[in-house]
Amino acid sequence: MTSTHNLLVICSAALLAVFVVLAFLAAVMQALIRLYPQLDARADAIEPTLAAAITEGVLAAYPGTKVTGIEELR
């Protein structure tokens, strides 16, 4: 009976530790989001990393082509 009781205590402590760590990480993330808010970009602007990824994808599929414009269709 003692072995089963110890296992239950260990599992409960581990579960509690996981919840404590996750709560701490959530608080840290919330603090970082408040400290460093997302920059307001123009609504029609495309992110440079996305433009580079699209350009590289087009060049890989169609060598020798040139991407002159990217637009989002909604």
Image (cartoon, rainbow, N blue to C red):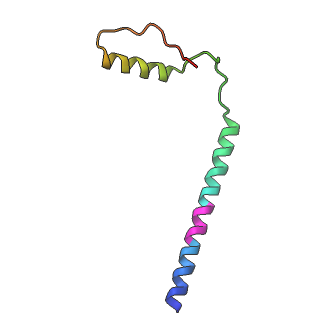
Q: Residue at x 64, y 50 (%)?
A: 26
Residue 22 drawn above or below residue 52: below
Task: Give the percent coordinates (x, y) of residue 3.
Answer: 49, 88
Instruction: Look at the picture and state if 74 lies above or below 22.
Output: above
User: Furthest-bottom residue in view?
Assistant: 1
- Image-based side of 10 in relation to 58, left or right: right
Report the residue that reaches farthest toward the front.
74
Q: Is residue 23 above or below residue 35?
A: below
Q: Is residue 21 magenta?
A: no
Q: Residue furthest left?
A: 63
Majority secondary structure of magenta residues = helix
Where residue 18 sits: x, y (%)? 57, 63
Instruction: Please tell me in which quadrant of the rendered image residue 55 appears.
Output: top left
Foreground pick, 58 / 42: 58
- Is 15 magenta? The answer is yes
Q: Position of residue 7 (x, y in %)?
A: 51, 81
State left or right for residue 51 relative to residue 60: right
Say if 28 sits above or below 9 in the image: above
For the C terminus, the quadrant is top right
* Percent coordinates x, y for residue 47 in the rendering: 54, 21
The magenta span reads 14-20
Q: Nearer the viewer, residue 70 or 34?
A: 70
Q: Residue at x 55, y 70 (%)?
A: 14
- Quarter where residue 10 is shown: bottom right
Numbered disc total: 0
Specify the quadrant of the image occupied by residue 53: top left
The residue sitting at 37% across, 19% down in the picture is 56
